[in-house]
Image: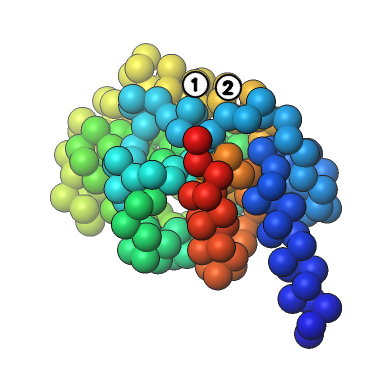
Amino acid sequence: MKSIMSSRRTFLAGLANSALVTTAALTGTAQASPTNGGKNARDLILPTDPVMGNPKGDVTLVDFYDIRCPPCRQMEPRITRLMAADAGLRYVPVDYPLFGGPSEMAARALLAAQAQNHYAEFKKWLFANFERPNMDLLQRAATALNLDWGKMQSDMHSPAMDDRIKTNMARGAALDVKVLPVMLLGPIVIPGALHYADMLDLVQSARKQQV
């Protein structure tokens, strides 16, 4: 047990002292590498991004995720708990539909729900449902949340939405995001899902490294 805890601390320390991870790290095979030029998660935020937690928080968590990604689903309650525990955390989810057409359909619906100020609720509803995203599922979610489904459909298929999806994909590609989730926490990149306690530790490490 002592050896396991020591390895965990070493891994977290490596993450906390690095700026970005290699593709190998994204697949779960350790080794952090500072290749993002010292940028901070806050540098990735766009004015159109949904923002949760504290919009003016001193630590930013940018989360590249796909609604169909099982590890992303695991992280959802942990991130929610983290926002409740840390009043200085700004959470910015980036819809990154890596898993194909159904994922992109869901991402478009999420961003359309954002236009009606229900992004967080829509995201939570979809994560709680294990069905493959389709228009019937999305309409049921919209109905359950009292959203204007007609407006959502229009927004989902607008040129502006096309641009947002392309922009999100370009942001992930620029960071070589190939496996999800990938979370940038201040100057730290987190490869994959982590336990809540580890997230808490890394928030404090990120806070100490703020410039």
Disc 1 residue crowd, few under 14, some 14–19, many 20+, Cα 10 Å: some
Q: Is residue 23 left or right of residue 192?
A: right
Residue 209: x and y in percent read: 55, 44
Residue at figure coordinates x 58%, y 22% from the top left: 170
Residue 180: x and y in percent read: 63, 46
Whether residue 166 appears in this view of the structure is yes
Disc 2 residue crowd, few under 14, some 14–19, many 20+, Cα 10 Å: some
Q: Is residue 27 left or right of residue 106?
A: right
In this view, the residue farthest toward the bottom is 1
The amino acid pointed to by label 1 is Thr
Residue 17: x and y in percent read: 69, 47
Residue beneath disc 2: 170
User: Where on the picture, by quarter, is residue 144?
Assistant: bottom left
Res. 57 mark: none
Label 1, secondary structure: give it.
Answer: helix
The amino acid pointed to by label 2 is Ala
Res. 167 mark: 1
Residue at figure coordinates x 21%, y 31% from the top left: 151
Residue at figure coordinates x 51%, y 57% from the top left: 204
Label 2, secondary structure: give it.
Answer: helix
Between 111 and 148, the one lying in front of the other is: 111
Residue 90: x and y in percent read: 37, 46
Residue at figure coordinates x 37%, y 32% from the top left: 49
Whether residue 74 appears in this view of the structure is no
